[in-house]
Image (tube, rainbow, N blue to C red):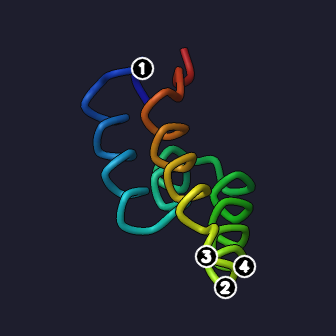
Amino acid sequence: MPEQGSAGNVIAALASFFIPGLGQLLQGRVIMAAFQFILAAVLWFLWLGWIIHIWSIIDAARFPGKT
């Protein structure tokens, strides 16, 4: 993916907005995607999943990419 703030990162952040970890999966970060998806799913039962959801969006948007 391109640099931070690029169209690719914006798309990844939008994907994570809908499903936590989906943006990371689009960026090729499978382990982080699985971690965020599972953690968000578990914490939604405690009404804290929104924290992971927001973290997932910010993490996808700020990913520096591979150069």
5 to the left or right of 67: left
Q: Residue at x 42, y 34 (%)?
A: 61
Q: Which mark is residue 16?
A: none
Count numbered badges in the picture: 4
Q: Nearer the viewer, mark 4 or mark 1?
A: 4
**Mark 2–mark 4 CB contact (< 8 Å):** yes
Give whichever of discs 1 and 2 has the lower sequence position: 1
In the displayed structure, 39 sits above or below 24; it is below
User: Which of the pair 57/63 is nearer the observer?
Assistant: 57
Identify the amino acid type marked 3: Trp
> Label 3 to label 1, Cα distance in Å?
30 Å
**Mark 4–mark 1 CB contact (< 8 Å):** no
Q: Nearer the viewer, mark 1 or mark 2?
A: 2
**Mark 3–mark 2 CB contact (< 8 Å):** yes
Identify the amino acid type marked 2: Phe
Q: Nearer the viewer, mark 3 or mark 1?
A: 3
Q: Which mark is residue 47?
A: 3
> Label 3 to label 2, Cα distance in Å?
6 Å
Q: Which residue is mark 4?
A: 42
Identify the amino acid type marked 1: Gln
Please, what secondary structure does the residue beneath circle 3 have?
loop
**Mark 3–mark 1 CB contact (< 8 Å):** no
Q: Badge 3: how crowded within 10 Å, few (<14), some, or many (20+)?
A: few
Q: Which mark is residue 4?
A: 1
